[in-house]
Amino acid sequence: MGSLGRMAGICSLGMLMASAVHAEDWKLAKDEDGVKVYLAEVAGSKYKAYRGVVTLKGDVASVRKLQEDVSGSCAWIYECREQKLLKHEGDHSWTYTRFDTPWPVTPRDSVLDVTTEEGADGSVTRHLKGAPTYIPEEKGFVRVSSVEGLWKLVPKGADQVEVTYQVHTEPGGSVPSVLANSFVVDAPFNTLKNLRARVEGR
C-alpha cells in the first residue's frame, strides 16, 4: 500500500500462523476458482475475522508494486471507493480509504498504519493496524473503529506467489448481521480474484 517500500504492513509469515487477529479455529467458508476463504470467531467481537489465500502466477515484486500504488489499488480492492496515501515515514505508511456500502448502511472510511517487513525467504508481510484518530472524521462517513490484519506475499518457486489477506474489523455504527456475514466472505474472495487478474493480465 503506497510507498510501502518496506511494507511493514500486514504481519510476518510466522505471525500469520500465530494469527495476528487473535482468531482461532479457522473454518473454510468458500473454495472457488482457486481462492480459499476461511473465517474465525474473535473473542469479544460479534464480527468474524477472514483469511483469503490464493496462489498466482507472477513474482513478489509485481504484487508489491500493485499494492504500493495506493490510489490505483482501490480498483481491485472490494468495495473501495477511494484510497490515498496520507504519509510515509521509514517502514510505516498511513493510508485513508473510503468504502461503498449497500443501502441503508452509511458508507465507511478507515485509516490504516501499514508496516512492512521483508523475510529472508523473499517474502513480504504488511501489517495492518487501524489508526481511526489519525485524521478527523469525515462528514457522511462512519469511521471504522478497529482494524487488525495483514497481507503476506510468499514466493513459491520461480513464477508463483502465495498471497494471504487476513483481516478483522470493528466497522463502527450498526451493520446488519446478514451484510456483515456476506462481507467477510466477499471481501477477501473478490479482492484476491481482482488482484490475481491484474498480476496475470487477465
Image (cartoon, rainbow, N blue to C red):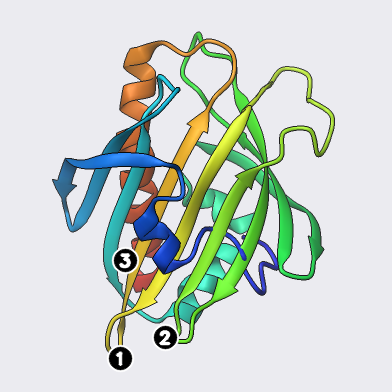
Residue 81 percent across, percent down from the top left: 59, 37
Can residue 70 be seen from the camera position used here? no
Amino acid beneath label 2: Asp
User: Dot 2 lies on which element?
Assistant: loop
Marker disc for residue 121: 2
123 in relation to 190, above or below: below
Q: How would you rate the neighbour count of disc 2 (Cα within 10 Å): few for under 14, some for 14-19, many for 20 or more?
A: few
* Residue at the outermost bottom position: 158
Q: How would you rate the neighbour count of disc 3 (Cα within 10 Å): few for under 14, some for 14-19, many for 20 or more?
A: few
Residue 156 is left or right of residue 114, and the answer is left
For marks 2 and 3, give the CA distance: 28 Å
Marker disc for residue 117: none
Amino acid beneath label 1: Ala
Q: How would you rate the neighbour count of disc 1 (Cα within 10 Å): few for under 14, some for 14-19, many for 20 or more?
A: few
User: Dot 1 lies on which element?
Assistant: loop
75 in relation to 45, above or below: below
Q: Nearer the viewer, mark 1 or mark 2?
A: 2
Nearer-N-terminus badge (1/2): 2
Residue 82 is left or right of residue 64, and the answer is right
Nearer to me, 94 or 168: 168
Quarter residue 28 falls in = top left
Q: Residue beneath label 1, please?
A: 158
* Residue at the outermost right position: 136
198 in relation to 104, above or below: below
Q: Residue beneath label 3, please?
A: 202
Nearer-N-terminus badge (2/3): 2
Q: Nearer the viewer, mark 1 or mark 3?
A: 1
Q: Are marks 1 and 3 in contact (CB under 8 Å)?
A: no
* Identity of the residue drawn at 36% across and 13% down: 177
Residue 109 percent across, percent down from the top left: 65, 31
Amino acid beneath label 3: Arg
